[in-house]
Amino acid sequence: MIAALLFAVAAEARDWPSADIVNEGTVAASPEAMVAVLTDLARVGTLLPRDCVGQWTPGVPASGAGATAEVRYDMAAMHRKLNMTVTRVEADAGRALVDWDHAGNKGFVTRWTVTAAEGGSAVKLASPLNPPPWPFTKYYFDAVKPEWDACQAKFIAAVGKAAGG
C-alpha cells in the first residue's frame, strides 16, 4: 500500500509538458471573413466537430462582441459545460484577435489570432490551461489533450471553409 502511494506521488511530481491546447493552420479566407464567422455564434454551432462538442446553444446576443453561448465540450471521458462570451474582437488591416471567454472556476480563454498570409490567413487557436490535479493528470495528457488538439485542427479547417476558404 505504501509503495503504491509513493509511486503515485512520484508519478505526480513528473515534469509534464504544457497543458495548453495550441493549433495553427492556414486557410484560404481573409482575416475579416474569419472574424465574421467567429463572432456569429449561431453559425459557429454548425461548424463544430460533433465528436468534440456535444452541445452548443447560442445565447442573446448571438453575434458580435458580447455574443454568448452555452457549450459542452466532450473530449475522451471529459465533459465540461460552460458559458462562453466573445469578450474581445480586434480587427485591423491584415490581423485579427477574437477571444472566447469560458466562464467559471474550470473556465479558460480561447484566443483566435488570424493574420493575413499569401492566399488567405495564418490562424492560431490557443487555449492556455492548467492540467487537472492528480489522479487525472496522466489521463488528461494521454487521452484528453490529444483529442482536443485534433478537434481544434478540424475546427480551424471548418471555420476557414465557412469563411470562404
Image (cartoon, rainbow, N blue to C red):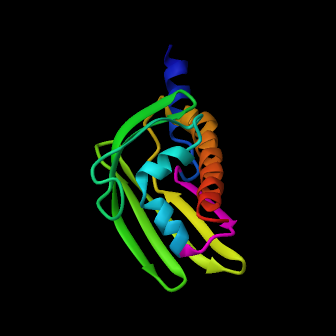
- Residue nearest the viewer, comparing 78 with 163: 163
Q: Position of residue 68 (x, y in %)?
A: 32, 51
Residue at horizontal 40%, vertical 63%? Answer: 99
Residue at horizontal 42%, vertical 52%? Answer: 41
The C terminus lies in quadrant:
bottom right
Q: Is residue 64 left or right of residue 47?
A: left
Number of marks drawn: 0
Q: Position of residue 118 (x, y in %)?
A: 71, 81
Is 25 one of the magenta-colored residues? yes
Residue at horizontal 32%, vertical 64%? Answer: 65
Q: Position of residue 145 (x, y in %)?
A: 58, 42
Residue 11 visible (yes or no): no
Residue 104 visible (yes or no): yes
Kindly give the residue lying farthest to the bottom in the view shown.
Answer: 93
- Residue nearest the viewer, comparing 75 with 20: 75
In this picture, is 66 found above or below 102?
below
Q: Position of residue 54 (x, y in %)?
A: 49, 32
Is 16 one of the magenta-colored residues? no
In this picture, is 96 found above or below 41?
below
Kindly give the residue lying farthest to the top in the view shown.
Answer: 1
Q: Quadrant of residue 115?
A: bottom right
Q: Is residue 106 left or right of residue 13?
A: left
**Segment tinted magenta in the rendering:** 19-31
- Residue nearest the viewer, comparing 58 with 135: 58
In this picture, is 18 found above or below 64?
above
